[in-house]
Amino acid sequence: MTRVIPGPYDPADMSRFLDTFMYEESAFLVDEVLSLDVEQRSIEAVLDTTRSLPFAERQRTDSRHPAHVAAGEILMVTGSLGCMHAWFFHGCRWDEGWAGFGNRIHRADFKNLARIGPPLALESREIRARAGPHRVVIRYEFRFSQEDILVYVGDQTAMFMKDRHL
């Protein structure tokens, strides 16, 4: 059963996104969408850091190494947001032959640990996009913060293709 992810969209459209997504739903690391701005090509969302996170759950923690959202999970969040951009802003539908992948991390700055507990505020914005009938290339800027403290800044590119093998 598809979980309900609150947001400013038709719930049926998000259900279709999740039901046909390239990963199982548990790997989609967005828990609430606060805004989808088509004109600005930006998304604001939230990650509940108390949810099941595969790397975070397996950390050995102590006072020097507190429980936190691991770098791999932070990067997976960028993939989740990037796929939302492709779906909601560019019409890339997984069940219509589209698939994609992140193909370049231009910059990934981990500014602070994203602690387990407080939610992580997620912001993504398209810097540039090239779209054709069978290929969409998007460059993104990501900014994640927790309790007004910047946690992650990223500059990444992803490519989405229709009816082609990746």
Image (spheres, helix red, strand yellow):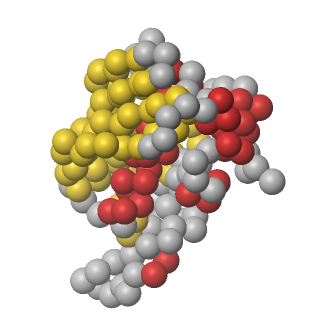
Q: Is residue 52 above or below residue 138?
A: below
Q: How many labels, in total?
A: 0
Q: Is residue 143 visible?
A: no
Locate the N terminus and report the quarter of the image it occupies: bottom right
Q: Would residue 95 be seen by someone viewing this image from the given angle?
A: yes
Tell me which residue sits at (39%, 75%) in the image. Answer: 67
Between 21 and 3, the one nearer to me in the picture: 21
| Side (left or right) of 42 relative to 51 | left
The vertical placement of 51 against 20, above or below, is below
Eyeballing the image, is 39 above or below 138?
above
Q: Quadrant of residue 26?
A: bottom right
| Position in image of residue 83 (x %, y %) | 49, 37
Most distant residue in the top direction:
39
Q: Residue at x 62, y 44 (%)?
A: 21
Residue positioned 58% across, 48% down in the render: 22
Whole-percent x and y of residue 145?
Answer: 34, 48
Residue 110, position as x, y percentages in the image = 23, 56
Is 124 on the left-hand or right-hand side of 49? left
Q: The C terminus is located in which quarter?
A: top left
User: Horizontal and vertical percent for residue 54?
Assistant: 50, 71
Residue 19: image quadrant is: top right
Q: Is residue 40 above or below residue 142?
A: above
Residue 101, picture quadrant: top left
